[in-house]
């Protein structure tokens, strides 16, 4: 059963299930869920990313768009969109712009 911030994070990422009624889960505000997930992401940082997610993150930082990343990695656009969303959630980023900014800064720092 989900009883902690970590449990809510696992539920949100699809790694856990719960027996809460659908209306209860639906009533959770996106804002609260994002705050909990962002707190987890802030603690874990880039080490929380899988190898593939890290590869996608680096390509985003190099200025590649979703379609170009999909072609380069020979994956579907949908798969890359899923990776982007997982990265964003794990890092506690609010939107694609924050993801792009974080990826570009990381890429520039890792080169320097």
Image (cartoon, helix red, strand yellow):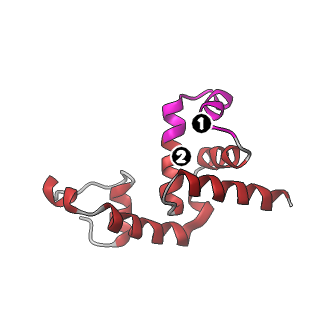
The answer to whether residue 50 is above or below residue 8 is above
Q: Name the residue under label 1.
A: 66
Residue 94 among magenta residues? no
Q: How many marks can you see?
A: 2
In the rendering, at what x and y percent does residue 12 appear? 35, 56
Q: Residue at x 42, y 65 (%)?
A: 37
The quadrant the C terminus occupies is bottom right
Residue 58 disc label: none
Most distant residue in the right direction: 112
In the rendering, at what x and y percent does residue 24 appear? 16, 60
Give the camera-side residue of 63 and 17: 63
Give the camera-side residue of 75 and 100: 100
Q: Earlier in the sequence, mark 1 or mark 2?
A: 1
- Residue 59, can we see it? yes
Q: Tell whether label 2 touches label 1 (CB within 8 Å).
A: yes
In the rendering, at what x and y percent does residue 42 appear? 54, 70
In screen coordinates, is 81 left or right of 56?
left
- Part of the protein shown in magenta: 64-81
Q: Mark 2 points at which residue?
A: 84
Label 1: state its secondary structure.
helix
């Amino acid at each position: 059963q989900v009883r902690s911030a970590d449990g809510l994070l696992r539920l949100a990422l699809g790694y856990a299930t719960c027996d809460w009624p659908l209306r209860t889960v639906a009533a959770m505000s996106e804002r609260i869920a994002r705050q909990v997930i962002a707190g987890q992401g802030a603690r874990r940082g880039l080490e929380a990313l899988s190898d593939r997610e890290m590869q996608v993150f680096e390509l985003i930082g190099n200025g590649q768009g979703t379609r170009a990343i999909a072609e380069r990695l020979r994956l579907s656009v949908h798969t890359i969109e899923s990776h982007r969303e997982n990265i964003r959630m794990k890092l506690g980023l609010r939107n694609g712009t924050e993801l792009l900014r974080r990826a570009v800064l990381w890429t520039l720092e890792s080169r320097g």
